[in-house]
Structures are given as structure tokens and as C-alpha cells.
Image (spheres, rainbow, N blue to C red):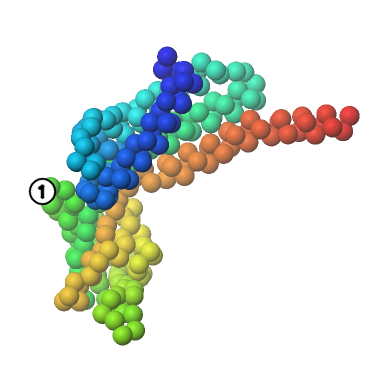
Amino acid sequence: MLSSPRLTLVLLIYSVLLIFVATLAQREIGIAHAQVIYFEGFFGMGKIAGVSFPFIGGAVIGILSVVNIVLSAMRFCKFGVQGLGVSITHMSLALLIISGGLQYFLRIEGSVVLKPSQTTDIVVIRNSTSQIKKLPFTITLLEFKEEKWSGSSIAKSYSSDIVFKRGETSVRTKTSMNNPASFAGWTFYQMSYGKDGSSVLGAVKNPARLLPWLSVGATFFGMMIIFLPRVFRKGNRYEK
């Protein structure tokens, strides 16, 4: 049953419904809270327009999807080039889902607040206790720039000129809206700023960040193995 195509269809339909419900819930509880409740949990109670309902969370759907994909690959596996392509595609899709779980458990998110000429090696981790994590390098804010819309007090753009330093290695770079900067496995992006001229940088460390790219590439490779021989086979048939 776990390898059944019917289970695959049910999981796909339920996933679409879950995304739809979570999207509606965002208006009432916010994006971050909706993500935690609907996608990161196993089971929960949702509430929309005052109506409460139980649901199965994204974590359960992810586990069932991985099991379904792996068992389906084993059940319908065939020898030859076609079988190889099917196996690669199935395992790549399973890896894509697993990478999402790894990012949830391994990902570290926090923030760094710096005033001009200030140096720090501390990141405040975003959780209920606001943990502090010491970085293996320092960050120095050289200059913070803010540009406002003409005739308005609303910020048009803001950026930070920063320097990363670890030992004898020193890297000067710039981070701005939609333009992050990376160093030593950490990614920093311009999150906000303070009225005192300080810069608020978001800090993210995600050891599994390359797995989704690897999974997508492997999935494409597997599909190429499946379909290319069919294309050439049809071409030879037409030539005859």
C-alpha cells in the first residue's frame, strides 16, 4: 500500500489543500507562525474564520512521500537504461524532500546589529530564549547607507558596507536589499535598520543548502535518461 500510485495521488492532493489552507491562515496568524503550525509540525489544530479543525502536518506528509517514492522505485524498478532513469528520478525526488527536513533541523537563523565602525562576532539566534552564538570570524560595519523616496520618509533602499575577518583573511563586501553576502558558510542579508543609524543584518547558516540544487539536477538527469532513448527510437522509426 505504501508504494501505491493511489497514495502518491492522495499525498499530492492533500499537499495542495494544505498549502491553500495555510495561505488563508497567514492573514490571521502571520507567515512565520503558519509555516511552523502547518508545514513543520506532525499534527495540529487549525483555525480559519473562527472554525477549528484537525489536520495532518507537513512533517507527516514529507515522511510518507519519501517512503512512497522509495518503495515505488523498488516496486516498479526495471533493468536497463529506462530502469536506471526511473530509479535516479525517484531517489532524487526523495532526496529533495529529505533536504527540506535537513534544512529544518540544521539551519541556524539569527541577526546581527551593528553601528558604524563597530565590530562583533556574535549572532543572536532566533528562538524563544534568544541564544547567542559566537562566530569563528568578526564582522565590522564600515558604513550604512539609506536612500529615501523623493519627498518621502519611506526608505527606498539601504545597504551596509562590511568587512569579514578571520585570522589573516579579510574580505570587504556590501550587502543590500535582495543582495546578500556570504562568508565561511554564513549568509548575511540586509534585514532592517535602526533610528540610530545601526544596521540590522539577518544571518543564516544552512549546511544542507546545496542538496536541493543537487536533487533537482539529478532529477533532470534521470528524466533525460528516461526520455532521450524514446526520442531517438521514434526518430529512427520515422527514417525507416
Q: Quadrant of residue 63?
A: top left
Task: Residue at the far left: name it.
Answer: 129
Residue at x-position 27% and y-position 48% = 26
Residue at x-position 50% and y-position 41% = 216
Q: Quadrant of residue 210?
A: top left
Residue 79 lies left or right of residue 53; in this view the side is: right
The residue under label 1 is which amino acid type? Thr
Q: Nearer the viewer, residue 25 or 134?
A: 25
Residue identifier under label 1: 129
Residue 239 lies left or right of residue 137; in this view the side is: right
Image quadrant holding the C terminus, namely top right
Q: Position of residue 226 (x, y in %)?
A: 63, 30
Q: Eyeballing the image, is 161 above or below 76?
A: below
Q: Position of residue 128 (x, y in %)?
A: 12, 47
Q: Eyeballing the image, is 46 above or below 111?
A: above
Image quadrant holding the N terminus, namely top left
Residue 73 lies left or right of residue 64; in this view the side is: right
